C-alpha cells in the first residue's frame, strides 16, 4: 500500500487498512503484509508483528535499487496481524 507523499500523515492509510481488516475478517484469521525497513513501524502501530524476513529480496528481484523514504530497500520484512480472536488460539487461514 502506498499513499501519495503530499497526502501522508492524514490517516488515509490507516482508514484503508481498517477497511481491509473489516472486509477480510469474516473469511480469514490472519493478514500478512510485506514491506521494507521504512514501513515496519507503521504496520507495528496497526498491531502487526514481524513474521519472517526474506534477505536481499529487493536486491535480487529488482534490476534497479528501490528507495523508500530515503532508505534503500534490501530485505523484505513480512508482518502478520490477527483479524479475529481465534487466531490468538493458533488458528490461521
Image (cartoon, rainbow, N blue to C red):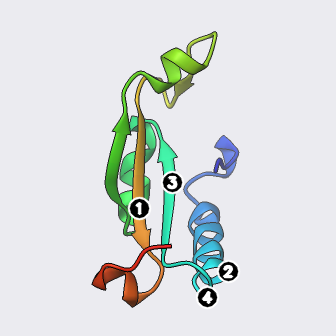
**Along the line of sight, which residue is nearer the eye, 18 or 4?**
18
**Residue indicated by mark 1:** 80
Q: Nearer the viewer, mark 4 or mark 2?
A: 4
Marks 1/4: CA distance?
17 Å
Residue 86 place in picture, x, y as percent: 38, 88
**Residue indicated by mark 4:** 26
Q: Residue at x 41, y 61 (%)?
A: 80
First of labels 2, 1 by sequence position:
2
Mark 1: secondary structure: strand
**Residue indicated by mark 3:** 33
Q: Residue at x 70, y 45 (%)?
A: 4
Residue neighbourhood size for the residue with mark 4, other residues' Cα within 10 Å, grouped as few (<14), some (14–19), many (≥20) = few
**Along the line of sight, which residue is nearer the eye, 46 or 88?**
88
Quadrant of the image occupied by residue 16: bottom right
Q: In the rendered structure, are the residues bearing label 1 and label 3 in contact, judged by CB atoms less than 8 Å apart?
A: yes
Residue 92 place in picture, x, y as percent: 43, 74
Amino acid at each position: 500500500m502506498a499513499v501519495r507523499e503530499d497526502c501522508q500523515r492524514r490517516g488515509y492509510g490507516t482508514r484503508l487498512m481498517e477497511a481491509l481488516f473489516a472486509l477480510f475478517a469474516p473469511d480469514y484469521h490472519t493478514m500478512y503484509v510485506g514491506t521494507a525497513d521504512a514501513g515496519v513501524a507503521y504496520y507495528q502501530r496497526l498491531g502487526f508483528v514481524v513474521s519472517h524476513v526474506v534477505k536481499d529480496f529487493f536486491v535480487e528481484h529488482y534490476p534497479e535499487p528501490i528507495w523508500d523514504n530515503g532508505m534503500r530497500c534490501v530485505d523484505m520484512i513480512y508482518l502478520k496481524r490477527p483479524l479475529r480472536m481465534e487466531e490468538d488460539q493458533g488458528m490461521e487461514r
